[in-house]
Structure formats: C-alpha cells, structure tokens
Image (cartoon, rainbow, N blue to C red):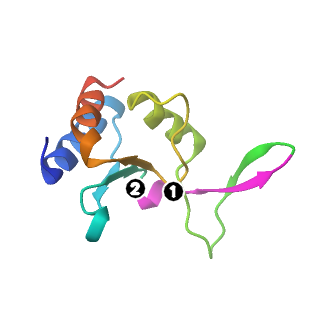
Amino acid sequence: MIERNEAIRRIRAALKKATGKTWSVSGGDRGTAWGWLTVDAPPRRRTSAYDWSEAFGEVERPVRAEETGHATKDERLELGLIFGEQGMIHYQGFSISPEDRAAAVEMAEAGR
C-alpha cells in the first residue's frame, strides 16, 4: 500500500502534468478519516454552487458571498475522466480510501 503522504504528493504532481492545473489533494486529519484522501479544485477555483431541481436535477450557479463554493461541472468531469468515473465526481470532491490509493495514483499518473 502506498503511504498517505507519498500518494498525496504523487497525485498532485500527476494531475498537474495531465491537466496543466494545480489541484487540491488533501488527507483526513484525524480519526477514521486519517487514511482517506480528497481531490478537488483548489479554493480559488471553487466558484460554483449547486441547487437541486426536480425538473432539471443538479443546477450549477455562481457561488454567493456567504457560501462555500465547489468545483465547476467542467472540472468535476475532468477529474471524473482521470479517475475512471462514469461522469463527474461529487461536487464535494473525489474521495479515495486507503485501499484504493495505489489504483488512484496509477490512474492519475496515466492521465486518463
């Protein structure tokens, strides 16, 4: 199994190489979250918010001043393609379990 900090370093570098952009790759800081990783757009690029509509599903809109933003749909799709998802990643980021770290590093380094 790939050590947590090594996985963070390698995924960051691979995503930068594959997309030309910097990504936020962070690890849980305590308890059972310790081994999990989250990949997301960095805070300055989290400019979207999402509402749910029965008619339209998830609707993207600009973030309001009092809200915490999320990655845009385009960036969510970009990460989804790299990590082998069927489509976009969740609006709160892509979670990687300790058991899936090695596979996630391989996918990021392959730049899928």
Q: Which residue is drawn at 40% across and 55% down?
A: 42
Location of residue 87 (image quadrant): top right
Tag 1: Cα neighbours inside 10 Å, few (<14), some, or many (≥20)? some
Mark 2 secondary-structure assignment: loop
Location of residue 64 (image quadrant): bottom right
Disc number at residue 84? none
Residue marked by disc 1: 46
Residue marked by disc 2: 42
Task: Determine if residue 8 is in view.
Answer: yes
Task: Determine if residue 29 is in view.
Answer: no
Residue 85, horizontal then vertical, whole percent: 47, 30
Mark 1 secondary-structure assignment: loop
Three-letter code for the amino acid on which mark 2 is drawn: Pro
The boundaries of the magenta stretch are 42-54
Residue 4, horizontal then vertical, whole percent: 17, 52
Relative to 78, 31 lies left or right = left
